[in-house]
Image (cartoon, coloured by chain):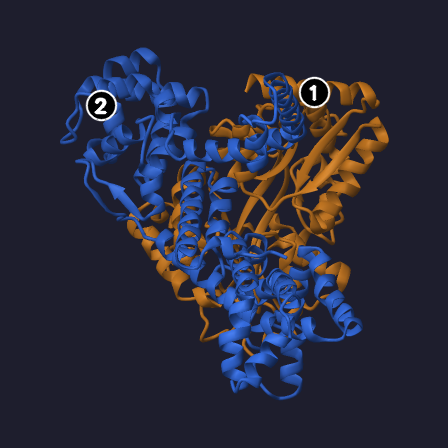
Chain colours: A blue, B orange
Amino acid sequence: MGQDQAITGSDPRLTAGEAALARRELRRHKLIALLLVVPLLLFLLFAFVAPIATMLYRGFNNPAVAQLIPGTLQRLVPWDGTGIPDRAVLTRMALDLRRLAKIRRSGKLAEELNRHLPGASSVVKSTARKLRRKSETELEQKGADLLLAANSLWSKPAIWQAVKKAGQVYTDTYYLTAMDLERTFAGDIQTRQSGQIYVKLYTKTLRMALIITLMCLLLGYPLAYFLANAPPKTANMLMIFVLLPFWTSLLVRTTAWIALLQTNGVINSFLTAASIVTDPLEMLYTEFSTVVAMTHILLPFMILPLYSVMKGIDPSYMRAAMSMGARPLSAFVSVYLPNTMPGLSAGALLVFIISVGYYITPALVGGTKGQMISNIIAFHMQQSNNWGLAAALGTLLLVLILTLYWLYDRFVGAANIKLG
Amino acid sequence: MKMTRLVTGVVLGSMLAAGAVAEELTVVSFGGAYGAAQKKHMLDPYTAKTGNKLLFEDYSGGIAEIKAQVEAGNIQWDVVDIEVIDLERACSEGLLEEIPTSILAPGDDGTPAEQDFIPEALANECGVGNIVWTIVYAYNEKTIGATRPTTIGDFFDTAKIPGKRAMRKRPQVNLEWALIADGVAPDKVYEVLATEAGQKRAFAKLDTIKKDIVWFDSWSQVPQLLNDGGAILGQSANGRIFNAIKEDGKPFKMVWDAHIYDLDVWSVVKGTRKMDLAFDFIRFATGTKPLSGMPDVAYGPTRKSSMALVDPKVVPDLPTSHLKEGIKANGIFWADYGESLGEKFNEWLLQ
């Protein structure tokens, strides 16, 4: 920067022509530099920025119902949310359901409505099935009656409120659901009546990530210290033991934990054979197994930055502190520990952030109890096809991590981080 | 969107131009012993006869993966073996192609296809019946202890039979069993399950054994769980247990009380670009000879002409010999309630 100014600024030793030449030369360099990073920028745009932007958008955008039953929604606009909508709406709905059943799209409508009113899915589908057999003219004449006769839910305001809510193209429903909230028809926000699971899951995820980080720290700090102070030959040897699992496939390491922890696995067989326990311990498919396996998998992320920082600490610091009368413990706390802070911060942040979004290990060894938020996001992506909710949950997770990072920067300082 | 398609098109086009174009069809089924029987009697003979390559993949049932492919417009599977309990739902949601009965081959004895198939096999326009199978529960004689289970009530009675129960991680069959174990008459199960009170009752019954349940996704896990003691009782497709007893000599026993029988059908995923090839495969696979190989794993063939070729020794093990003890899975019920009960089930799991 300083050099740039020296060239582009009016250096008194340069003539105007020379300065112009220098500026041109600088522009050329900048252009070449830009061209060199263009592939990277494009990659980031397509692989990082665009997906995240799409995710943010999907959490708000919900066009499915508006596309499926535009006629009904249009006629439903004046309805105030009490009683049954007038017959024109009912008739239109009956016709829409018949049309959707014919083109096999009633399932989509059912799925969308069910998100606003649990149980609505079966009502929509069974009604569509019944109306499919009627003729269009018959429905035009007495569609309203047939609809009401098909299921008693059609005479309740709840389902029409759900229709109206689901019909909004832009909605905050997914974000509210992701926080266990819902909006009443009047517009007030309240806790979700049909079950609260997501806040609990976020808390659990954070708690587990914190435990894993602490475990990694407890195991990794002494080991990194030992590695940094051992003779080079021993240190290199031990470093390979740290790196070897790091290079091994994640699936292999996770599966190994299954073999170790399962009901009749290695650990239980040993414990029962040694008569330490009589009944095998239940270790696999619990929160415990998730924490153990993830601590093992993420340990190198803690050790490596710690090691590189500890390697650079001059041993004479500690000697100096002790020669001036500090006890080993206080010398460690006031001299060594602060010096390792950059590595410690980097390691802890890496482990914490990776574990908050971890997916494979909890999915394999966590059972139903050790699931984390990412497993639920995957569930909504792959199983329930509720991409809007998955997007909202993902966005909240991103916001959560950014907030934590901000807090960290605020109180510890991100400039302090040293990765190696 | 257009741009992406264009790029994909160009890339695919150049790939096709580069390599030879072989007719290749992706066929998806349940793997394990059943998959092996299908490979032996349907896929391998088809490849030998026509030279068309088949990619045979496994899945664990349900419609989620098919749905994700259809909704994303990214069809990777062509032909799928699907349970009738899911068929109606998949068909009414537009995830499957209609299969005209005119593509089906007549029986080897000359009977026209419509008369040769049992009526249930062609009841839905989106599928052609493949096997009659059933869901029972089984135990290992070595690990069971003194009291043997005989009824579906015993499955839910942890005082009588302590230990883990392996169950498939989905509401289908589990909710039916919970109600029957709670005293609902088998022929009233779906009627009760359609009511709010009935659903609460089923989940309350499942609650009583919730901490003793080991959930599995794939049928092939059950023989493993029973064998290594991961579970004392295991819900299973009858063929898997039959195969473990017959082929591997495992000391397993099946309990037929309240078994829920169903058909498996071949279906074609909506929007596949290989429809003709898919139909050609289904025509072959549902022929008399290939179907007559299914009793290898104790599944009943859906053609009368195939039944004539079945070894009489296997007949007592076929689900069709136990219809009185069981109930028929109700595909229409699950088409209507699959979504909402699925959601409730998942929330219940997380509670």
In the rendered view, would you say A317 is above or below A254?
below
**Mark 2: which amino acid?**
Asp
* Residue at position x 43%, y 53% in the image: A409
Who's the residue at 23% across and 35% down the image?
A: A152
Residue A391 location (% of width, % of height) = 44, 39
The residue singled out by tag 1 in the image is B276
State whether residue A114 is above or below residue A11: below
Q: Quadrant of the C terminus of chain A?
A: bottom right
**Disc 2: CA contacts within 10 A as few (<14), some (14-19) or many (>=20):** some
Q: Residues within 10 Å of mark 1 (few under 14, many from 20)?
A: few
Q: Nearer the viewer, residue A58 or A308?
A: A308
Residue under numbered circle 2? A145
Q: Quadrant of the N terminus of chain A?
A: top right
> Depth check: B313 or A207 in front?
A207
Q: Pick whichever, A274 or A176, lies toward us.
A: A176
Whole-angstrom CA distance, mark 1 to mark 2, is: 44 Å
B132 or B5: which is nearer to us? B5
Q: Is residue B253 left or right of residue A55?
A: right
Q: Position of residue A43 (x, y in %)?
A: 62, 32
Residue A264 x/y as whole percent: 64, 73
Q: Amino acid at mark 1?
A: Asp
